Image (cartoon, rainbow, N blue to C red):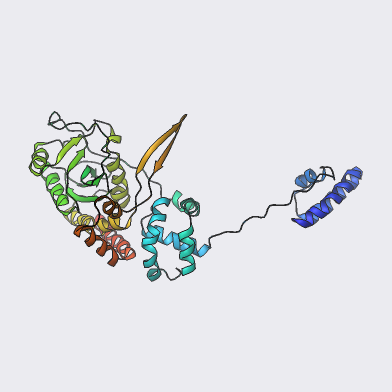
Amino acid sequence: MAGERLAKALPGYRKRYAAAERKERSKVLDEFCGITGYHRKYAMVLLKVPADVPVVKERKRRGPTYSAASVRVLEQIWKAADYPWSARLKALLPLWLPWARKHLHNCTAEIEEQLLKMSARQMDRRLAEKKRKLKRHIYGGTKPGTLLKHQIPVRTDNWDVQEPGYCEIDLVSHSGPHASGEFIYSLNLTDIRTQWDETRAIMGKGEAGVVKALDEIRRVLPFSLLAIDSDNGSEFINYHLVRYCDKHGIQFTRGRPYKKNDNAHIEQKNWTHVRRIFGWDRYDTPEQLATMNALYKNELRQMMNLYQPSVKLQSKTRTGSRVTKHYDDAQTPLERLIAAVGTNPATDKLLKRRGKLDPFLLSERIEQKLAELHKQLKK
């Protein structure tokens, strides 16, 4: 019994319950529980209230706003986009939904409308169970260098720049459970202003190999490389890289030793653009090196810079022991680049390329190449 029926019947049951003897009260309670389906303890609480106390009507609960079909489509897009968190997922939906009609047979106009209205918090709730299964840990494997530190200044500001070209760089090791012998590293570069990311795989962390990979990255960037900031590893603190930066007019600075937060942008990209994709396996063959670079130069570069939105920390507010972080709106690196430099031949070319690229096919090709890499591991 709910709502109006309960409001009409409850006062009568309360009067009968209050006036009855102990044995009769049990019968009234049985009757009331039989009609309402309430537990006896809860029914006793209701009936002990005086009869003249008004009955509070049961609150009507709102039914689900989003259908199960819309959540399934959301899960499929979330998986194809490599599991972005909710703010980024909401931002990428307008880019992915036109292609979803082609790849997902259950993606109707009604479902698209529901997904575009869904808030980031709602997406978190709907995907919470699946997210719990994807948690992993991270580790690193490079050591501090000691050469030329007096010639490479420590970066003392936070590089709050308004133009692209100021970048952080780092190496991610693919040594597996042990770091003996020669194995592959990923040289990762991210731009502070636009979050544009470029990565190359190199065999070992020799000085010449790092410079060669950085030069290749510099040539494909859609903006001029103006400055780099690294940690204190010997792969960066060396004469080869200093001479290269001097030759090309690139400012070269380093973070404080053992202060990873000085390079927070690249540390975050090491996780999203390298570790989450390639995991913690050991890669140490030329065949694996070629496969990784085929991904870095093509599908991963296009997916991360053209289709994957990111957010940037704007400020922190401390209230007692609690710190609240404030982020800007999620945007793709391409959108941030256009906001920074406007339209030019480079950005126009990238926009045309994105208009022709199918993100679902990109995702499939990435999975195919990763499967090929895993086969190579078993040989």
Q: Quadrant of the C terminus?
A: bottom left
Depth order, front residue of 262/26:
262
Report whether 253 appears left or right of 89: left
Depth order, front residue of 68/312:
312
Depth order, front residue of 127/251:
251
The quarter of the picture where residue 146 lies is: top left
Depth order, front residue of 182/190:
190
Residue at the spot x=32%, y=48% of the render?
A: 272
Residue at the spot x=37%, y=51% of the render?
A: 330
Residue at the spot x=18%, y=56% of the render?
A: 290
- How many callouts does the rendering have? 0
Image x and y of residue 269, in percent: 29, 46
Report whether 35 appears left or right of 237: right
Image x and y of residue 239, in percent: 9, 37
Figure check: 20 above or below 80: above
Residue 302 visible, this orientation: yes
Residue at the spot x=50%, y=51% of the render?
A: 125
Image x and y of residue 378, in percent: 26, 56
Image x and y of residue 282, in percent: 25, 48
Figure check: 119 above or below 52: below
Figure check: 160 above or below 127: above
Q: Quadrant of the N terminus?
A: bottom right
Residue 378 visible, this orientation: no
- Residue at the extreme front: 342
